[in-house]
Image: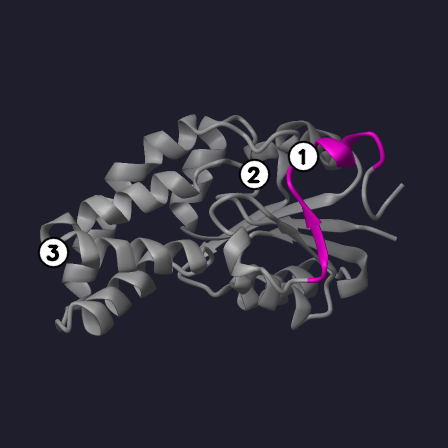
Amino acid sequence: MLKGIIFDFDGVIAESVQVKSDAFAELYKPYGSDIVKNIVEHHEANGGMSRFEKIKLYHVSILNKTITKEEISDLANQFSQLVVEKVIEAPYVPGALEYIQKCHEKYKLFISTGTPTSEIRKILKARKIADCFTNVYGSPEQKTTHVNNIISKYNILPNEMIFYGDSSSDMHAALSHGIPFVLRLYSLNQHYFGNYTGLTIRNFNDLLSNLLYGE
């Protein structure tokens, strides 16, 4: 019996992945188009990874530059300034808002995202859906830690949950705990999951009349 649902945010609830891609492109624009292309491709293939981890990785592995914690924090703040209002304004994945509102009446709902916790809380509040979620988990904690916390704090068994995500980190966090995973496929991630044979959705419209895992 379904008791809890975990959602990633960008690309699952909101069509906001492109917003983040554009922000990384803007941050690394001074390094040239080839660098920007590599960084955006990595970002889109690793949606659940925090911006702090990505910024450090991009400097060390792509730019071959050392970077201090202060510099990472500064770039992350610049990134936040570029994205927050645009994510707040981003359209919902079709059917997502209605699905959340309907599920909120029956199940405990959770967010597991690579976005900093304080920032995602601000976004949910601005979009007027914060009250739909039992708890919200963001970076710097990993998604596997999010899932551990949900299982232990709310006493929900893995087979009593479902995880909707759009990245390999979402899939790993779910499947490593034995939680059924549903992949949201769309134009920016479908070429990374060519061999995926699990459950997929394109949007939530098909789930509204007959809720998956719970009717």
Asked whether disc 3 touches disc 2, contact meaning CB atoms under 8 Å apart, the reply is: no
The Cα–Cα distance between marks 3 and 1, rounded to whole angstroms, is: 41 Å
Q: Specify start and end residues of the magenta stretch as a single range.
A: 197-210
Corner quadrant of residue 22: top left
Residue drawn where x is 45% and y is 64% of the image: 141
The Cα–Cα distance between marks 3 and 2, rounded to whole angstroms, is: 32 Å
Amino acid type, residue under disc 3 in the picture: Tyr
Residue highlighted by disc 1? 100
Choose the circle earlier in sequence order: 1 or 2: 2
Q: What x and y, as percent, mark residue 99?
A: 70, 33
Residue drawn where x is 20% and y is 44% of the image: 26
Q: Residue furthest left?
A: 30
Choose the circle earlier in sequence order: 3 or 1: 3
Residue highlighted by disc 3? 31
User: On the rendered structure, is 129 left or right of 206?
Assistant: left
Q: What x and y, as percent, mark residue 115?
A: 41, 50
Amino acid type, residue under disc 2 in the picture: Ile
The dot on residue 13 is 2
Q: What x and y, as percent, mark residue 60?
A: 20, 73
